[in-house]
Every structure is written in structure tokens, then in C-alpha cells.
Image (spheres, helix red, strand yellow):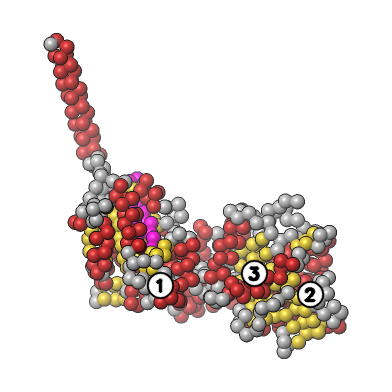
């Protein structure tokens, strides 16, 4: 039996308010219907009137229950879809869903002394999941006779076969040695901030190898900071499963987020779109409450607004919504083109300039390659960075992020000082070989870091003329480039390659007033590195000088009259040369 868990048309379906479940799932209808009946009978005690889940849940939750319990082969007693990832906004009933699904699993369990685990990152989150499960048992006489709940241990035990549902927190409880059949990982984004998260999750889910009927659910809201760690890894993986770029029929993604094209226009400002990241809108999510809190957040501060938008509209944090952030950051997402590689910039440009910044042992060395499109005249930006391995020890707070950029091949770690500079120089020479590197003012370098770069580029092997390397003044003297890049981003004149590395740098950039000017200050940004962005500003300075490529033919011009005159003159010259050659041939034949 073959099936796919991909839903490549998810963008159209989520906008239309349709189910995100893939077509053709291997559903055992009898089991799915039984599980749904059990789930719908469970009561929610913290809602007035104590309604059942069947009475107060939106359809998307029933879809989830149907798929989770229905993808099961009863003959082989094997769960067919074993990992499920759910991304929903805050207040969409995640803790209640956790309780309901895990109680349903406990009721359906056929394994004596079976273990079921809700794993939360903190005690508070664990309590939020246990309390609704406790209420579901105590509010149903039949369940209360069958199950024994304990608020002390956060456990619910089946009196008949000693199977148990335990709710544990990773920061307070011992997670090792679990033999859980079903595991519900709550608030995965918080695990993403834990250095030990991979080990914790491995301990919690390791027993799945010997429990064919088992499965794992990862449920989470969006992070309040740019996604990192295990959260980022799972988010990327399950987006790939959903999109069909990763073929894994044992994994299923229900991700409630805005389509990429919508994100560019800040759709969360329009209440008509709120149902997209909030599938429980009108049930556990109140539209008036959302509207009121959004207005309050906008008035309080951009920091408050950024947090609210990430948690309630599933917008990834990091760009353009923080106090003192660079104004260009809010236009950065809309200027992205993922197809813009270094080779594509070389292919499309009539001239290229290069910016370089950083390079200390606990710093990044940033490279920016900026081309001017020969058709649209837009500036095209590609970036890369290098870091010494030691930076992960000196800057532990960003070590995980740097590792992620390295995995994406947007950052390269080097072991020896100088390796980064020579690798950078190789890229410069690739551009030089194309004939497109500017003839003058080609390479802009931080005035304090020019020596090592100059030495590498002007070596006998590479042969770049020293005069083509320019020291770029820092601080307030970059004011013009900062403003120019802001305008180019806002006006669509600058297109970048959409690197997560640059999202990180742009999101970190802090503006500092300097008299009548502004600067992007490294000291204010601290350990949150901005070197690749500053390299981009260096390139912006050079592109503003209207450069000409070193290998330019002289035919590039916007003056069509002048171009026609050049063509006519060239044709006349060619005709004259041909006539002269013909006469010479005739003379040679006579003699």
C-alpha cells in the first residue's frame, strides 16, 4: 500500500478554509470513527457549561484526530503515520488538544502497563496540559471509575491494566528510560532554545522503535525569536513533507501559517485573514479579543508588537518589528528571490562590486556580491560569511544559529586564521574572471581590516590591482549607504537571495543616532552579528559610484542615439576594411 502525506496545494486550501489533510491517507475508518467518538465525549472543564470536545471543537481538530488514529493497520497492529507536526497560533486550544488526544490514546490502548507521555519544556506548560486531562477524567463517572488521576505526580493510571499517562516537564522531571507508546511534545519552540533538546527528545521517543503501534505528535506555536535548534529542524522538515519536496509517508504536517506571498504584505493587519493562522477562530479564539490586543501592542512598542504577531499570527520573529531596528528591515522579506545565486548574479549583471566586513577571531567575515542587472538596472545581492570554530565557544548564545547557517552552506567554519580570507579571495577571483568586477572602486573593505584582504587579493597568484580595493569609512559615514539601501528595498530596487544568514544579520541591526546622521552600530548589536549586512552596505557605497566593469565593451549605454551612431560608424569601418582587403587581394593577384 502506497500513499503520500504531501499537500502541495496547501496555500490555496488554507486561504479557502479547506482541510489540510492529504488525499488518499490509509485510513481505517472503523478505528478512526471509534477514536473520534471517544474524543468528542471528553469534557472541557475550564469552559462555562463544561461542554464536550465534540461541542466546542472546530473541524480541523476532528481532522487531526481522524488522521492520527485512523492511519493504523489493525492486522499488523502498526501505526502507519508515526510523526505528526502541528503548528498553530496561541489560544487555539493546543493544551486541550494534547489532553484530548492522549486520553483517547489511553482509552484505546491494548498494551498492559502501556506508557503515554506528554512532554513539556517547563513545569507551567506541563500543568497546562495535565489540568484539562485531569478534568476530563473527574467529570465523567465512567472514566473516573476506570482511571486514577494524581495532581501530585501529574499522572493518570488505568486501574484495570496499569497503563499510565504521565505529564512531565523537561526542566524538572527525569525523562530518561521512557517506554512510551505515544508521545506528545508540547511547545516544541521552547525546546529549540535548549542545548540538550535533541538528547531529551531522543530519550522520550526512543521506545518507538519497539512499539509499532506508537506515534509522536509535535505541537507548537511559533517562536518569539527566530526559530532555532530542534524546532527549526522539525519546522523545515515538515514544511518539506507538506510541500512534497520530502517524501516521507510516515510523517504528517498540519501547519497553519500564511502563504509566503501573503507574508510580504503583513496580512495580520487585516482581520479578514486571521482565520489562516488561527483555525479555531470563533471557538477558542475570540476575534474581538485579538483586535483589542493587537491595537494595544501597536501602541505599547514595536517589541511588544513583534511578540504578539509571532505568537498569535505565526509570523517568524526577527525582521522589522523591534525598537531601534534598521528601517530597511521591514522591507527585507518582500525583496527576496531564492533563485538569486552567485552564478545567477554573474549571468544577469553588467557590472559587479564587492563588499567585505569583519573577520576577527570571535567575529564573522562577511562578503557581499552586488550586481547591477543589465535589463532592469536593479541591484542584486548575494552574501556569504566565514567564522573561526572558536567563535562558538566565545559566543555560545549564537552558536546554534551559526551551526544552522553552516548546514545551509551560507556560512563556512574555518580552523586556521587566514583560511577564511583566502576562501573569500577565491570568490572574488571568480567574479573577476567573468570580466564584470568594476574597473575602479571594485572591492570595499572596512578601513581597519583592509591589510589582510589586500594582501590576499594583490598576491602574485591573484593579481588584483591595489587601487581597486577601497577602505570604507565606518560609523556615521555609512549614513548615506544605510539610507540608500532603505530606499532601494522600499522601492523594489534591491533584490537579495533570501538567506537565513542575512535575515539574522538584518534582524540584529540596531540604529544609533549620530548628530544629524545615523549608524548601524556593532557595539550596540553586541553578540548578535551584523557583519554580512555591513558588507552589503560597503557594496552599496561602491554601486552608488556608478561603476563600469573591467571587461566592459564600451557598448553599454542608455543613450540610443549615441548607440546608433556607434553602430553606423562600426559598420562603415567594417565596410572600408573589407573594401581595402579586396583591393589588396586584387593587386596581389596581378603580381
Q: Quadrant of residue 454?
A: bottom left
Decide if residue 554 is on the left or right side of residue 489: left
Pointer 2: residues within 10 angstroms few (<14), some, or many (20+)? some
SS for dot 2 = loop
Decide if residue 410 is on the left or right side of residue 538: right
Residue 311 in view of the camera: no
Identify the residue at image location x=70%, y=80%: 167
Observer-nearest of 207 and 531:
207
* Cα–Cα gap, marks 3 and 2: 20 Å
Q: Which residues are magenta?
A: 367-385
Q: Which residue is mark 2?
A: 114
Going from the N terminus, do you reach mark 1 or mark 3 first? 3
SS for dot 3 = strand
Identify the residue at image location x=71%, y=68%: 208
Going from the N terminus, do you reach mark 3 or mark 2 first? 2
Q: Which residue is mark 1?
A: 390
Observer-nearest of 465 and 185:
465
Amino acid at each position: 500500500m502506497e500513499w503520500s502525506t504531501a499537500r502541495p496545494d496547501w496555500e490555496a486550501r488554507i486561504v479557502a478554509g479547506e482541510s489540510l489533510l492529504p488525499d488518499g491517507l490509509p485510513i481505517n475508518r472503523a478505528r478512526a470513527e471509534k477514536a473520534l467518538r471517544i474524543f468528542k465525549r471528553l469534557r472541557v472543564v475550564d469552559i462555562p457549561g463544561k461542554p464536550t470536545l465534540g461541542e466546542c471543537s472546530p473541524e480541523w481538530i476532528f481532522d487531526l484526530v481522524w488522521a492520527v488514529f485512523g492511519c493504523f493497520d489493525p492486522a499488523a497492529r502498526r501505526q502507519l503515520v508515526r510523526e505528526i507536526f502541528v503548528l498553530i497560533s496561541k489560544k487555539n486550544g493546543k493544551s486541550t488538544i494534547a489532553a484530548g488526544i492522549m486520553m483517547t490514546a489511553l482509552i484505546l490502548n491494548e498494551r498492559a502497563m502501556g506508557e503515554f507521555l506528554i512532554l513539556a519544556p517547563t513545569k507551567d506548560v506541563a500543568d497546562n496540559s495535565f489540568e484539562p486531562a485531569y478534568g476530563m477524567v473527574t467529570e465523567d463517572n465512567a472514566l473516573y471509575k476506570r482511571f486514577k488521576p494524581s495532581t501530585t505526580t501529574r499522572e493518570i493510571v488505568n486501574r484495570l491494566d496499569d497503563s499510565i499517562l504521565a505529564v512531565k516537564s523537561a526542566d524538572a522531571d527525569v525523562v530518561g528510560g521512557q517506554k512510551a507508546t505515544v508521545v506528545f511534545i508540547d511547545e516544541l519552540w521552547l525546546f529549540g532554545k535548549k542545548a540538550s533538546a535533541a538528547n531529551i527528545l531522543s530519550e522520550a521517543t526512543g521506545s518507538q522503535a519497539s512499539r509499532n503501534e506508537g506515534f509522536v505528535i509535535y505541537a507548537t506555536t511559533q517562536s518569539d525569536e527566530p526559530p532555532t535548534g530542534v524546532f527549526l529542524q522539525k519546522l523545515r522538515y515538515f514544511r518539506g513533507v507538506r510541500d512534497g519536496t520530502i517524501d516521507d509517508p510516515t510523517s504528517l504536517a498540519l501547519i497553519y501559517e500564511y502563504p509566503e506571498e501573503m507574508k510580504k504584505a503583513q496580512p495580520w493587519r487585516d482581520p479578514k485573514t486571521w482565520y489562516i493562522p488561527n483555525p479555531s477562530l470563533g471557538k477558542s479564539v475570540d476575534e474581538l479579543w485579538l483586535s483589542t490586543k493587537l491595537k494595544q501592542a501597536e501602541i505599547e512598542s514595536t517589541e511588544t508588537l513583534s511578540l504578539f504577531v509571532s505568537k498569535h499570527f505565526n509570523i517568524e520573529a526577527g525582521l522589522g518589528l523591534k525598537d531601534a531596528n534598521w528601517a530597511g528591515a521591514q522591507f527585507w522579506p518582500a525583496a527576496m528571490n531564492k533563485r538569486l545565486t552567485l552564478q545567477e548574479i554573474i549571468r544577469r549583471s553588467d557590472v559587479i562590486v564587492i563588499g567585505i566586513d569583519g573577520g576577527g577571531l570571535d567575529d564573522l567575515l562577511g562578503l557581499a556580491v552586488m550586481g547591477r542587472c543589465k535589463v532592469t538596472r536593479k541591484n542584486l545581492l548575494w552574501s556569504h560569511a566565514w567564522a573561526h570554530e572558536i567563535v562558538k565557544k566565545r559566543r555560545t548564545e549564537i552558536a546554534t544559529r551559526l551551526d544552522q547557517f553552516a548546514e545551509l552552506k551560507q556560512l563556512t567554519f574555518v580552523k586556521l586564521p587566514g583560511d577564511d580570507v583566502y576562501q573569500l579571495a577565491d570568490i572574488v577571483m571568480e567574479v573577476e574572471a567573468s570580466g564584470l568586477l568594476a574597473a575602479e572602486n571594485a572591492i570595499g573593505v572596512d578601513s581597519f581590516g583592509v591589510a589582510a584582504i589586500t594582501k590576499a587579493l594583490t598576491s602574485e597568484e591573484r593579481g588584483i590591482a591595489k587601487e581597486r580595493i577601497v577602505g570604507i569609512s565606518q560609523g556615521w559615514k555609512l549614513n548615506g549607504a544605510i539610507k540608500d539601501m532603505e530606499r532601494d528595498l522600499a522601492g523594489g530596487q534591491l533584490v537579495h537571495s533570501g538567506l537565513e544568514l542575512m535575515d539574522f544579520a538584518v534582524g540584529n541591526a540596531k540604529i544609533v543616532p549620530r548628530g544629524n546622521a545615523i549608524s548601524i552600530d556593532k557595539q550596540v548589536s553586541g553578540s548578535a552579528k551584523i557583519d554580512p549586512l555591513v558588507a552589503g552596505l560597503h557594496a552599496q557605497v561602491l554601486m552608488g559610484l556608478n561603476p563600469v566593469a573591467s571587461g566592459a565593451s564600451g557598448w553599454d549605454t542608455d543613450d540610443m542615439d549615441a548607440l546608433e551612431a556607434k553602430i553606423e560608424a562600426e559598420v562603415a569601418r567594417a565596410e572600408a576594411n573589407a573594401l581595402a582587403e579586396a583591393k589588396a587581394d586584387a593587386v596581389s593577384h596581378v603580381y
